[in-house]
Amino acid sequence: MSERVIPLVDQRTAVVAAQVPAAPIVPGGQLRDRLARPLRDLRISVTDRCNFRCSYCMPKEVFGKDYPYLPHAALLSFEEITRLARLFVAHGVRKIRLTGGEPLLRKNIEVLVEQLAQLRTPDGAPVELALTTNGSVLARKAAALRAAGLRRVTVSLDGLDDAVFRRMNDVDFPVAQVLEGIAAALAAGLDPIKVNMVVQRGTNEQEILPMARHFRGSGIVLRFIEYMDVGATNGWRMDQVVPSAEVIERLQQHFPLRALDPTAPGETAERWAYEDGAGEVGVISSVTQAFCGSCNRARLSTEGRLYLCLFAEQGHDLRALLRGGASDADIASAIGLIWQGRSDRYSQLRGQQAPDASGGGRRVEMSYIGG
Ligand code: SAM
Ligand code: SF4
Ligand code: SF4
């Protein structure tokens, strides 16, 4: 008899059931994974949809009109997200970042921000709450987000040249509107504001200097990100990566820089100060300098799956526990068990054994779990 094949309705990645261990794992902030890494940072994707089609993330050929986005009922509600976030905070999370897809497309996102802003760590401190956005509707949303309790925002912007930017977002979206969004964020008192630029060889490397020049001295921290091989759809090639070391070298030729110490353990960005006092700039070397050894980050997908790595091939289904009537203690134990079993370190392995460190499975898309 042949084996029965159950077709997967959702092709994104494999999903595994979250198990509640027999012995409870009581949150105490001491949780460690198999490589002794704590759980400190949670990224929550609030939608898998986006109004941009950046070729390195949601290429049009794949994310076309017929792409099967998640139906609304599949998404975690704000209450479900907040309930999970509270349990993660009890386990040691200190920083929550809302992402997507484009998080500002989720209706009433400021209501979720308001709920998350109430969370307190076991010692009574507020959780560091941030949001990453493409900036397209930030001008309209910034004041409401700030009023709801958001402090920090990261805006993605891949260049100042309008033609280059329109081509990269692939929906003909103008730079000026993103700059308006950044200005509105400044005016609303969001602070700090960071700008992320993904650098792709042959596409926008000529924008490195103009971007640095534009944001120097503005109080906004610009960070250059190496183009990563996330997901399975962007056709990534190593020769399209501009190594951070090269970015710094190019900047140094115009603006002398001095390396700064990291502000927090597990920080992904390497920080540099302009010698002339015009603020700082950063690089995120996800490809050329793996930071898996200190990676303390978990990712919660739009439909409540927990991913332990940006390159994970499977997610742990927390939504089934939420909707199956599990208690907070059970869900916290399940999260604890999942984290204790974590040994992911994809980027480090990629560096060591080039061809296919991932094991060949289907990798999760960036737009589904956020950056
Ligand atoms: N839509 C929002 C945005 O663009 O800011 C939030 C989600 S987006 C997936 C989060 C971040 O991931 C963005 O800064 C984006 O530039 C970055 N990103 C997406 N695909 C990437 C890739 N292949 N390599 C490096 N960064 C990438
Ligand atoms: Fe959308 Fe952000 Fe991905 Fe661009 S990087 S397609 S803006 S989710
Ligand atoms: Fe963390 Fe995975 Fe990235 Fe390594 S590859 S830094 S484990 S997310």
Image (cartoon, rainbow, N blue to C red):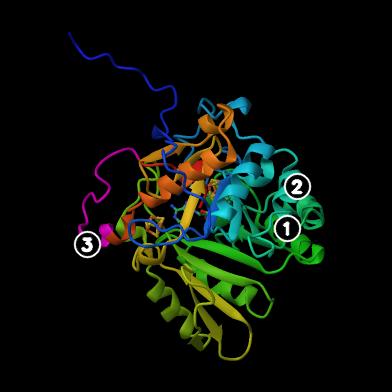
Quadrant where the N terminus sits is top left
Q: Which amino acid, by three-letter code, is at mark 2?
A: Glu
In the image, which residues are magenta?
349-362
Q: Is residue 213 above or below residue 89?
A: below
Q: Quadrant of residue 102?
A: top right
Q: Quadrant of residue 244?
A: bottom left
* 198 vs 250, nearest the viewer: 198
Image check: 288 left or right of 102?
A: left
Q: Which amino acid, by three-letter code, is at mark 3?
A: Gln
Q: Position of residue 196 (x, y in %)?
A: 56, 63
The residue under label 1 is 150
In the picture as drawn, the residue positioned furthest to the front comes out as 23
Image check: 114 left or right of 217?
A: right
Query: How many numbered markers are drawn?
Result: 3
The residue under label 2 is 110
CA separation, marks 3 and 1?
Answer: 39 Å
The residue drawn where x is 53% and y is 37% is 304
Which mark is on residue 352? 3
In the picture as drawn, the residue positioned furthest to the left comes out as 1
* 325 vs 264, nearest the viewer: 325
Q: Position of residue 182 (x, y in %)?
A: 71, 62
Q: Can see residue 362?
A: yes
Q: Nearer the viewer, mark 3 or mark 1?
A: 1
